[in-house]
């Protein structure tokens, strides 16, 4: 299909169907990286403040870390649908279909409104029983229950902000969400200081600060989408939403595999936390060490996540425009960029890992366990980088089932069993369970590599745009 893009391009939108692929992806990823840094600042700021200004800081850090897989599990399908909408919008934009973009925005917002209320109720009701299933106990159990209860109240604005970012990314505008996120992050830090240090609300204050901050970013996003001219007006009006259920089916076809993948990931981490909390009974501080190190790991991996997110929009627009050779060139360059970034990240993090961990805790055992995690997984993150980039490229092409399959194989057939086997047969050093991450990454990458190099993702690559 030849490039038939006729949509007028206004300031703020990025046409990724022409120009240097590497430059476009890199420049598009920079605002995403800044936004991801700000988003991670939420959890890092929370951990630093509670770790240094509360009586049971180590337990609160462990509680927040234990809560995350449950929170992500409940929201996984939301994020998958949001990513599906972003890809559809990118393909419509690449094809110059303005009406398709408007229909996609209306449809996905109706889904948000309908689904968020029951999800909030279910989350509040089931969070404690799930925490008990994964062996959370004592203060960790109590703090996790409070944190999740407050956080689930903010499900709608949390997903709404991410949905707005997905819409804008699909239009090629990764910068404006950064502005909103900057405001929200600043507000979150100020509220953390107020709620935790001044008012002494502890873990409830952490959750409330995040909910209020994300709500502000959500509202700003709606205002922008209604006012901004991208060569056409979206004009989001909740009273006049006109859903397109055929389009929602296509969004679900692309987004649900990613949502299911997120659910599987969250379930896998819940199984892992069951093991980690069990180990924590014999080795106190193990859970806190793992969750503290994960914050460092998550922060260090942000450049690669940003490149992977950028390649989704890049592939989506070029699929919409029919530029298959250009897709392959951009994906290849992004993989090389991800590998190079992984080497630099590892060289920075490992020598200073103890210093980074001391931001959250001064407990020697916790620091040692955190280093045990980082030294066993950080040297191999280049494998995960290739996994992320190729998976997002396939999603951008509308082929989301293979990344889901790779994630399932890597997580459930490799990493989770490996973690329990290592813990059983090599209990003398509990940190060795983290070698299971490498085992899972390698195993999960294999089917993705095979499918990508088979070229089957190119077959009828524009079918979603045509069907919509």
Image (spheres, rainbow, N blue to C red):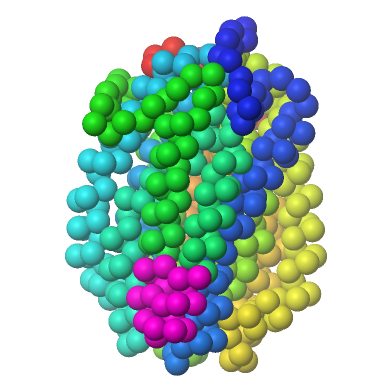
Nearest the eye: 459 or 26: 26
Give the x, y percent position of residue 304. 66, 49
Q: Which residues are magenta?
A: 190-209
Residue beneath the point at 56% across and 70% down: 44
Q: Where is residue 295? Give x, y as percent.
A: 57, 68
Q: Does 414 appear above or below 239?
A: below
**Magenta highlight on residue 206:** yes
Q: Could you tell me what secondary structure mostly forms the magenta stretch?
A: helix
Front residue of 278/344: it is: 344
Q: Nearer the viewer, residue 435 or 203?
A: 203
Was residue 278 drawn as part of the magenta stretch in this picture?
Answer: no
Residue 177, image x, y percentages: 54, 44
The answer to whether residue 282 shows anywhere in this view is no
Residue extending farthest front? 227
Q: Is residue 109 visible?
A: yes
Give x and y (percent) for residue 158.
39, 53
Which residue does the image show at 47% across and 37% down from the upper left?
A: 224
Total numbered badges shown on the rendered structure: 0
The residue closer to the viewer here, 67 or 29, is 29
The quarter of the image holding the N terminus is top right
* Position of 131 relative to 394 (above/below): below
Residue visible at 52% across and 25% down?
A: 229
User: On the rendered structure, is 445 left or right of 408?
Assistant: right
Q: Residue at 66%, 25% (x, y): give it.
A: 16
Quadrant of image for the C terminus: top left
């Amino acid at each position: 299909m030849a490039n038939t893009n006729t949509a007028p391009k206004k300031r703020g939108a990025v046409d990724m169907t022409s120009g240097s692929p590497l430059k476009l992806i890199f420049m598009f990823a920079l605002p995403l990286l800044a936004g991801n840094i700000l988003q991670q600042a939420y959890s890092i700021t929370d951990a630093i403040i509670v770790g240094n200004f509360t009586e049971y800081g180590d337990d609160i850090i462990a509680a927040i870390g234990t809560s995350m897989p449950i929170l992500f599990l409940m929201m996984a399908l939301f994020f998958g649908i949001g990513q599906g909408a972003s890809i559809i919008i990118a393909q419509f934009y690449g094809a110059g279909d303005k009406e398709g973009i408007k229909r996609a925005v209306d449809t996905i917002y109706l889904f948000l409104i309908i689904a968020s209320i029951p999800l909030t109720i279910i989350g509040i009701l089931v969070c404690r029983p799930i925490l008990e299933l994964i062996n959370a106990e004592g203060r960790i159990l109590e703090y996790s229950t409070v944190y999740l209860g407050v956080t689930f109240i903010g499900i709608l604005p949390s997903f709404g902000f991410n949905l707005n970012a997905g819409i804008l990314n699909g239009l090629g505008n990764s910068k404006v969400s950064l502005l909103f996120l900057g405001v929200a992050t600043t507000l979150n830090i100020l509220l953390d200081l107020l709620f935790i240090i001044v008012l002494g609300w502890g873990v409830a204050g952490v959750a409330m600060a995040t909910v209020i901050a994300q709500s502000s970013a959500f509202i700003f996003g709606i205002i922008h989408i209604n006012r901004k001219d991208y060569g056409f007006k979206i004009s989001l009006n909740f009273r006049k939403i006109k859903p397109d259920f055929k389009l929602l089916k296509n969004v679900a076809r692309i987004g649900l595999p990613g949502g299911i993948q997120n659910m599987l990931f969250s379930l896998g981490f819940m199984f892992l936390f069951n093991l980690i909390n069990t180990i924590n009974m014999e080795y106190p501080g193990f859970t806190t060490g793992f969750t503290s190190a994960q914050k460092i790991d998550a922060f260090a991996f942000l450049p690669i996540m940003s490149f992977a997110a950028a390649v989704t929009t890049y592939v989506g627009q070029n699929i919409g425009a029919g530029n298959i050779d250009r897709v392959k060139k951009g994906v290849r360059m992004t993989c090389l960029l991800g590998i190079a970034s992984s080497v630099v990240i590892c060289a920075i993090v490992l020598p200073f890992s103890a210093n980074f961990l001391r931001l959250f805790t001064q407990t020697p055992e916790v620091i040692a366990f955190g280093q045990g995690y980082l030294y066993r997984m950080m040297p191999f993150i280049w494998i995960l980088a290739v996994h992320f980039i190729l998976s997002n490229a396939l999603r951008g092409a509308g082929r989301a089932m293979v990344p889901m399959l790779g994630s399932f194989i890597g997580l459930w057939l490799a990493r989770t069993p490996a973690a329990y086997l290592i813990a059983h047969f090599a209990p003398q050093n509990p940190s060795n369970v983290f070698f299971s991450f490498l085992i899972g990454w390698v195993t999960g990458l294999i089917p993705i590599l095979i499918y990508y190099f088979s070229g089957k993702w190119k077959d009828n690559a524009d079918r979603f745009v045509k069907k919509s």
